[in-house]
Image (cartoon, grey):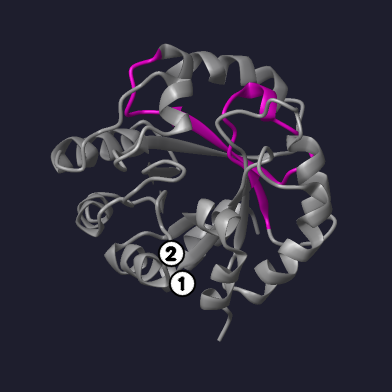
Amino acid sequence: MSIYQNILKAKKEGKKLLAVLIDPEKIDIENIPLFFEKVHQSIATHIFVGGSTDKNNQTKNVVIAIKNVTKLPVILFPGDVTQITNTADGILFLNLLSGRNPEYLIEQQIKAAPILQKTTLEILPTGYILIDGGKETATLRVSNTKPISQNNKELIKNTSKAGELLGKKLIYLEAGSGAKVPVDASIISVVKNNLNIPLIAGGGIRSKKQLENAFAAGADIVVIGTAFENDETFFNQLKKQ
């Protein structure tokens, strides 16, 4: 069964999924085995690998190290075309729908197309929507786009629906790495009720309560990265029952 089929199956069954986001610039490869001992004790179901930048070109090496210690699906979450590696299982093929910078609406995708044709990666077309998390994030600086205000629920809802109608298989609401506040539960709920495809939410989630709120509001997949980077004991709150 493909990664996407498994996501759809979980959505149908009401099973919530947790993706651990690993930034190649922020993890020491030597620490990956120990880190994954904690991952495997938690409710994590997917591994996302990527960041806004990868100055030392470590994505491939990080993915290889991860694949050596886990059977969880490893999905690229690339900041740009240079982070594509066939060593992963799949890739979130992103369109930054909230921005109007052509580089992230179509130019990066054109550059990626011939590379992806030569890989065995499962491609997951994803509508990526930046939501204001109260902090200027690396994604904002790199993409040179503005996030959508959390007060503008109508625009967030319509942007998400436009992504679905364009054929995206996933919608990703992102407050940004290290966001002060996560995407509000009311926004997740509004978007979820207007979509027929799975919904991802991430950014600024630092507690089990915030995770549960995102799930309760309708997120099918929640992504946590910075919280684990800053405090690996957070995994203790998310242990399997």
Question: Residue 89 in magenta?
Answer: yes
Q: What x and y, as percent, mark residue 191?
A: 25, 49
Are circles 2 and 1 on residues that touch, CB within 8 Å? yes
Q: Residue at x 22, y 56 (%)?
A: 193
Choose between 188 and 146: the one closer to the eye.
Answer: 146
Quick one: which residue is furthest to the front in this view?
230
Residue at position x 51%, y 13% in the image: 107
Would you identify the image quadrant in which residue 77 lies? top right
**Residue, disc 1:** 15
Q: Is residue 14 above or below residue 24?
A: below
**In the image, what residue type sits under mark 1?**
Lys
Quadrant of the rendering where the C terminus is positioned: bottom right
For residue 153, above or below residue 208: above
Q: How many marks?
A: 2
- Residue to which mark 2 is pinned: 11
Residue closer to the observer: 140 or 67: 140
> What segment is highlighted magenta in the picture?
73-101
